[in-house]
Image (cartoon, grey):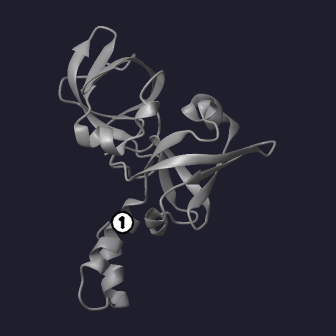
Amino acid sequence: MFTGLIREIGHVKSLAGSTLSIRAKHKAKLGDSIAINGACLTVIKVEHDGFSVELSPESQRVLAMDNFRGEVHIEPAMMMGDRFEGHIVQGHVDAIGEIKEIKNSGNSFDVFIKVEKKFIPFIIPKGSITVDGVSLTVNDVFDDSFRLTIIPHTMKETLFKNYKKGSHVNIETDMFARYVSHIISHKKKSLSWDEIDSISARY
């Protein structure tokens, strides 16, 4: 589990086959789970200046691979007792988004991201979303896109500073929206409000 708060900007040393090697200050341990640009990956090698993770063929198929070069977001998995910030993030990327537009509104930036329409039901206005591992709040949702407002600090301290129109990003939608949708779609009869309340209370 992760929170969507980036702990470090790492630097990709190489991507050879299924092995992604990253230079970082974080002292990883063999077998650790680490979110790289929002994707939960396993540490397979520890080096003096960083670590390497495994990118399976499935991971390479569903991730925005063009972002696994240069700088990358790093967030180690939460440990028991850690302070919980951001929102509940699994590190399971649902979709690849495309930056449609970035507008400078003076004291913030409006970022519009396009996704496949089938993912829109899981993107909730004023709800949480993860973009390349960054926990953010959704402002508006449209037919095939959504709008975020990025404050200058986030723009400066994350990879958002590098994004431009056409950039691809990893998207993890709201976990609760996905769970409720899955339960409803696999339940033969309609849910009562009591059952919906019961489902919500479990999380």
Q: Residue furthest right?
A: 106
Q: Residue at x 41, y 45 (%)?
A: 3
| Camera sees residue 36 | yes
Q: Nearer the viewer, residue 148 or 28?
A: 148
Give how far across and how far down residue 96 sits, in percent: 45, 48
Residue 146, quarter of the rendered image: bottom right
Give how far across and how far down residue 65 sits, in percent: 40, 34
Q: Residue at x 45, y 49 (%)?
A: 171
Give how far across and how far down residue 51 sits, in percent: 29, 18
Q: Residue at x 34, y 45 (%)?
A: 62
Vertical relation: 66 (above or below) 29? below
**55 sits to left or right of 147:** left
**142 sits to left or right of 14:** right
Q: Residue furthest top?
A: 48
Vertical relation: 174 (above or below) 39? below
SS for tag 1?
helix
Residue 183, quarter of the rendered image: bottom left
Q: Nearer the viewer, residue 84 or 98?
A: 98
Residue 44, quarter of the rendered image: top left
| Camera sees residue 201 | no
Q: Which residue is mark 1?
A: 178
Count of numbered tags: 1
Q: Residue at x 43, y 66 (%)?
A: 118
Which amino acid, mark 1?
Answer: Arg
